[in-house]
Image (cartoon, rainbow, N blue to C red):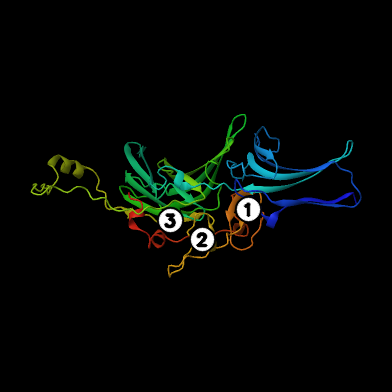
């Protein structure tokens, strides 16, 4: 046995996740097997972002320091949220050093902790507005015939938190005599790393596939995606790593793609009550406008010469590839409303749920019970509950079930 039998850093109450501005409280434990001459025991708190040109490489090309000081984060309110990716990471640690006399080896130990800097989605302009995009694809088929497909995609919001349902609606108008391929919606994560050059890592988080549209038909597809545990968008405070999310709706035949930007945060969007706006009515005594009972002759002839589109049909979902969160964890997510008693009396202040984190994928999140860090084998960034799951046990609820009790004014319109 050496002189130093135990040398470790312990944080109070076993905490691993902190918010910017909180003090770090803990102790350094030392146990010696024999007298050890030393000059001082130094404790420092360090935080930095490191980026490499190669995946999973510890030879960092660029590094950005956030602090290297004593045990306090009181003046570090801009520290970005912890993150770990293929080409870089944002890491925080407490390091203790036993400074020994000259020609003796210094002893060091460290303890990694994580910072969660909540992203309030309400601070993003127009975050509560529906997200809509459309594209028209013209193509040829059967050598001499031409047609077009109009693809329109929309979501109920522009930003979501972990455990929230992203409601998607796609409207497809097939103006050709050829059936389209199945429609696919994918939730994509794009991480940008700034090293000597920009490096991009794009991966599919969830994917939903619907049926195709028959020739000369108009169809509507309504689906939903449950947002899993993901790092927040943008990573404010970090200039070397940037995280973006997109919802991509596409057809392979003909090749048409619509991309909607989506924000992932920690504090949910506050829904303001929407009321229908009543337009100004005609003044008293004004003549009532006459509505024609039939279209003009030119429009009637043009409509008769083109194929007739029936009412939009509803497309079915063929496959749904994504992991699901346990329903018990929904209420413990950041931004979730607190339960209140039915009698109107103020609710007692509940104890905050513990913050946990998955080893190897630094995403702080709230969890029920006394869950601790659990290694995950999935390539996606998921909480510990997912580590023992295979494919989801059952399909997610249908669009009608999820929207049965929702306000009709909040549903996307085609």
User: Looking at the rendered structure, which numbered label has been put on residue 402?
Assistant: none
Does residue 206 appear left or right of residue 219 in this picture? right
In the image, what residue occupies the spot 63% across and 53% down? 357
Q: Are marks 1 and 3 in contact (CB under 8 Å)?
A: no
Q: Which residue is mark 1?
A: 357
Q: Position of residue 77 (x, y in %)?
A: 58, 42
Does residue 114 appear left or right of residue 107 in this picture? left
Question: Callout 1: few (<14), some (14-19), or many (20+) C-alpha neighbours within 10 Å?
Answer: many
Q: Quadrant of residue 383?
A: bottom right
Which residue appears farthest toward the top when viewing the image? Answer: 196
Q: Position of residue 310 (x, y in %)?
A: 26, 52
Among numbered discs 3 and 2, the one appearing first in the sequence? 3
The alpha-carbon separation of the residues under discs 3 and 2 comes to: 28 Å
- 362, 44: nearer the viewer: 44
Q: Which residue is mark 2?
A: 331
Does residue 1 appear left or right of residue 65 in this picture? right
Among numbered discs 1 and 3, the one appearing first in the sequence? 3
Question: Callout 2: few (<14), some (14-19), or many (20+) C-alpha neighbours within 10 Å?
Answer: some
Q: Position of residue 167 (x, y in %)?
A: 42, 53
**Element class at badge 2:** helix
Q: Is residue 161 above or below residue 345?
A: above
Q: Which residue is mark 3?
A: 317
Q: Is residue 54 above or below residue 396?
A: above
Q: Is residue 382 visible?
A: no
Among numbered discs 2 and 1, the one appearing first in the sequence? 2
**Element class at badge 1:** strand
Q: Position of residue 70 (x, y in %)?
A: 70, 42
- 295, 376: nearer the viewer: 376
Q: Quadrant of residue 152?
A: top left
Callout in the foreground (3, 2): 2
Which residue appears farthest toward the bottom when viewing the image? Answer: 343
């Amino acid at each position: 046995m050496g002189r130093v039998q135990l040398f470790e850093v312990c944080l109070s109450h076993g905490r691993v996740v902190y918010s910017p501005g909180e003090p770090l409280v803990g102790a350094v434990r030392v146990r010696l097997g024999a007298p050890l001459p030393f000059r001082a025991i130094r404790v420092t708190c360090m935080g930095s972002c490191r980026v490499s040109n190669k995946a999973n490489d510890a030879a960092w090309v660029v590094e950005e320091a956030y602090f290297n000081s004593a045990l306090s984060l009181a003046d570090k309110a801009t520290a970005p949220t912890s993150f770990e990716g293929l080409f870089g990471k944002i890491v925080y640690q407490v390091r203790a050093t036993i400074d020994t006399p000259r020609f003796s080896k210094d002893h060091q130990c460290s303890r990694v902790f994580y910072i969660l800097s909540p992203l309030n989605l309400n601070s993003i302009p127009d975050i509560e507005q529906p997200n809509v995009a459309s594209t028209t694809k013209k193509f040829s088929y059967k050598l001499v015939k031409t047609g077009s497909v109009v693809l329109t995609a929309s979501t109920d919001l522009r930003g979501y938190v972990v455990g929230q349902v992203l409601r998607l609606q796609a409207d497809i108008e097939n103006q050709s005599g050829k059936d389209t391929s199945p429609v696919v919606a994918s939730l994509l994560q794009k991480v940008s790393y700034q090293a000597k050059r920009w490096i991009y890592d794009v991966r599919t988080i969830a994917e939903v596939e619907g049926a195709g549209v028959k020739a000369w038909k108009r169809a509507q597809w309504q689906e939903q995606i449950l947002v899993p545990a993901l790092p927040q968008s943008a990573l404010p405070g970090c200039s070397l790593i940037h995280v973006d999310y997109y919802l991509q709706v596409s057809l392979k035949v003909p090749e048409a793609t619509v991309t909607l930007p989506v924000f992932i945060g920690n504090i949910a969007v506050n829904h303001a009550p929407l009321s229908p706006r009543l337009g100004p009515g005609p003044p008293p005594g004004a003549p009532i406008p006459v509505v024609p009972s039939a279209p003009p002759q030119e429009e009637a002839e043009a409509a008769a010469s083109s194929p007739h589109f029936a009412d939009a049909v509803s497309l079915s979902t063929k496959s749904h590839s994504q992991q699901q969160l346990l329903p018990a964890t929904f209420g413990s997510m950041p931004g979730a409303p607190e339960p209140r008693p039915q009698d109107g009396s103020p609710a007692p202040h509940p104890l905050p749920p513990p913050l946990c984190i998955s080893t190897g994928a630094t995403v702080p999140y709230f969890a029920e019970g006394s869950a601790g860090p659990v290694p995950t084998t999935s390539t996606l960034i998921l909480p510990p509950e997912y580590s023992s799951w295979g494919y989801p046990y059952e399909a997610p609820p249908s669009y009608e079930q999820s929207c049965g009790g929702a306000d009709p004014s909040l549903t996307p319109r085609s």
